[in-house]
Image (spheres, rainbow, N blue to C red):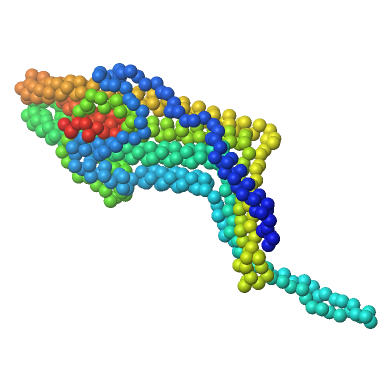
């Protein structure tokens, strides 16, 4: 619509009516589709493997803090601090979260008008024109040419009458929150893997120290059998058995050396370093197992980032239903522009050469062979799938906690029995060796006693390591530590 130099009041009144009608339509608009409600999930009234613990209450976030400090190991504290900075899986999750936040800003921008500025100039020319004179001959009058300059500003806006754009923003926001939970889950996973690998490395150091002491004892036993064989008291088989036992123990020690190297390499990757540039010296093992205070699992759904992510994806799927249902309604677009056009640049901004336009357009599919209805059905099915995944995540979380609680209780009892077995085996080994020296038993009985003692010692070390790794797994199943509730013990 161009403005005429002679605008009548009625011509100016029509755009105002159009604008008022658009505003009224927008004000009365409503978002189509279902409002989001958090889906229900099977929550037990009590934990089977624990007493006096209350059921969890859903929430999205709860500060977890440096849970690894519960194990009171300065080396572990230093390594865990490097995960946030250098771990590449965490870095990828951070980038994915930044991408999700950018998508929210992109969707939010669709709620506002798009304004464009345009300018142009063109020059046109024609062929040679001719005219006839009185005598009938033709005469050339010259070429025809002209210039045109334009400058203007325009804008378009899609009123969100049916809530399609708002649901897009809400869906993107839910996706961003899910991405934030994914970041927390990636960070927790990397930290947990680091702690387990670190404790496995320290356990390997303890096993190596145990084997080193055992090998020294086997070497002394071998010397005893060689002396007895040289004196004609013992048979050659005693020496051979002692040599076999010593060689097997030395081979086991080399296997632990290989295992430690692999764990050290894994730790290097977790902290974002090349294995060639990373090393950990052997150190005494602190088999600290933090006590678990009653009531910690009551915050399960608050602390599990995977559950929070699954719930946020249900919210995003719910918004997709509204977006699909908006396809049943017409799309409205408001366009406006103003500018000026002239044959000379000096006259470009003259009021007499200006123009403007304002328009409202609507588009509605009259027949799409059920495509829109199929989109709605697909969005509803995707929502149902997201709900099922959320409920499954909740069930798996409770199973995980129950498993780790049972393991925590059983391993504590098991360690006491391992200690008793180790003490008894050590005493039996010492007595059997003394009896062999006195010639009361054959050397095969000594070998059997020594093998039983070594097995008991290694089983005790393994049970201590299992308690630590189970504590880490329980912390992960709860979504983080509880350092704000109890101090390290």
Using the image as rendered, state which of residue 120 and residue 26 is in the foreground.
26
In the image, residue 307 lies at what x, y percent? 38, 31
Using the image as rendered, state which of residue 20 and residue 104 is in the foreground.
20
Q: Is residue 368 left or right of residue 436?
A: right
Residue drawn at 34 percent across, 26 percent down = 57
In the image, residue 209 lies at what x, y percent? 16, 36
Q: Is residue 42 above or below residue 97?
A: above
Q: Image quadrant of residue 474?
A: top left
Q: Is residue 381 left or right of residue 296?
A: right
Using the image as rendered, state which of residue 311 and residue 119 is in the foreground.
119
Q: Residue furthest right?
A: 135
Q: Residue furthest front?
A: 9
Residue drawn at 66 percent across, 65 percent down = 353
Q: Residue furthest bottom?
A: 135
In the image, residue 371 lies at what x, y percent? 64, 34
Q: Is residue 280 above or below residue 222?
A: below
Figure label count: 0
Q: Is residue 114 left or right of residue 209?
A: right
Quadrant of the drawing holding the N terminus: bottom right
Residue drawn at 20 percent across, 21 percent down = 413
Using the image as rendered, state which of residue 294 and residue 67 is in the foreground.
294
Residue 249 visible from this viewpoint: no
Residue 298 visible from this viewpoint: yes
Quadrant of the drawing holding the C terminus: top left
Q: Image quadrant of residue 194?
A: top left
């Amino acid at each position: 619509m161009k403005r005429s130099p002679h605008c009548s009041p009625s011509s100016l009144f029509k755009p105002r009516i159009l604008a008022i009608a658009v505003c009224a339509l927008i004000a009365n608009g409503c978002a189509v589709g279902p409002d989001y409600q958090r889906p229900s999930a099977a929550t037990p009234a009590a934990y089977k493997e624990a007493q006096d613990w209350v059921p969890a209450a859903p929430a999205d976030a709860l500060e977890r803090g440096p849970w690894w400090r519960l194990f009171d190991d300065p080396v572990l504290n230093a390594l865990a601090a490097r995960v946030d900075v250098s771990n590449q899986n965490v870095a990828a999750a951070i980038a994915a979260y930044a991408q999700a936040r950018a998508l929210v800003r992109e969707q939010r921008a669709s709620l506002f008008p798009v304004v464009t500025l345009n300018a142009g100039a063109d020059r046109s020319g024609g062929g040679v024109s001719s005219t006839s004179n009185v005598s009938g001959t033709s005469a050339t009058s010259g070429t025809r040419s002209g210039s045109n300059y334009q400058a203007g500003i325009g804008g378009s806006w899609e009123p969100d009458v049916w809530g399609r754009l708002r649901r897009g923003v809400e869906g993107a926001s839910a996706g961003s929150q899910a991405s934030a939970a994914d970041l927390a889950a990636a960070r927790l996973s990397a930290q947990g893997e680091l702690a387990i690998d670190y404790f496995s490395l320290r356990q390997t150091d303890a096993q190596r120290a145990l084997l080193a002491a055992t090998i020294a004892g086997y070497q002394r036993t071998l010397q005893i059998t060689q002396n007895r064989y040289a004196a004609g008291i013992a048979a050659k088989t005693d020496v051979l058995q002692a040599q076999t036992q010593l060689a097997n123990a030395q081979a086991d020690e080399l296997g632990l050396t290989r295992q430690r190297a692999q764990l050290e390499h894994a730790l290097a990757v977790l902290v974002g370093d090349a294995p060639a540039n990373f090393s950990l010296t052997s150190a005494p093992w602190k088999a600290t197992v933090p006590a678990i205070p009653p009531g910690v699992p009551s915050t399960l759904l608050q602390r599990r980032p995977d559950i929070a992510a699954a719930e946020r994806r249900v919210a995003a799927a719910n918004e997709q239903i509204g977006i699909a249902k908006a396809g049943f309604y017409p799309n409205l677009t408001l366009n406006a522009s103003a500018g000026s056009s002239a044959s000379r640049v000096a006259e470009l901004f003259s009021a007499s050469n200006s123009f403007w336009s304002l328009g409202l357009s609507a588009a509605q599919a009259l027949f799409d062979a059920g495509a829109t209805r199929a989109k709605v059905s697909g969005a509803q099915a995707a929502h149902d799938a997201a709900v099922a995944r959320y409920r499954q995540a909740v069930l798996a979380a409770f199973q995980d906690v129950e498993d780790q609680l049972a393991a925590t209780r059983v391993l504590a009892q098991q360690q006491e029995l391992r200690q008793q077995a180790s003490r008894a085996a050590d005493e039996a080994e010492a007595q059997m060796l003394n009896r062999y020296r006195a010639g009361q038993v054959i050397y095969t009985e000594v070998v059997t006693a020594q093998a039983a003692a070594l097995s008991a010692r290694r089983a005790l070390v393994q049970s201590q390591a299992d308690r630590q790794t189970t504590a880490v797994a329980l912390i992960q199943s709860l979504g983080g530590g509880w350092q704000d509730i109890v101090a390290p013990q």
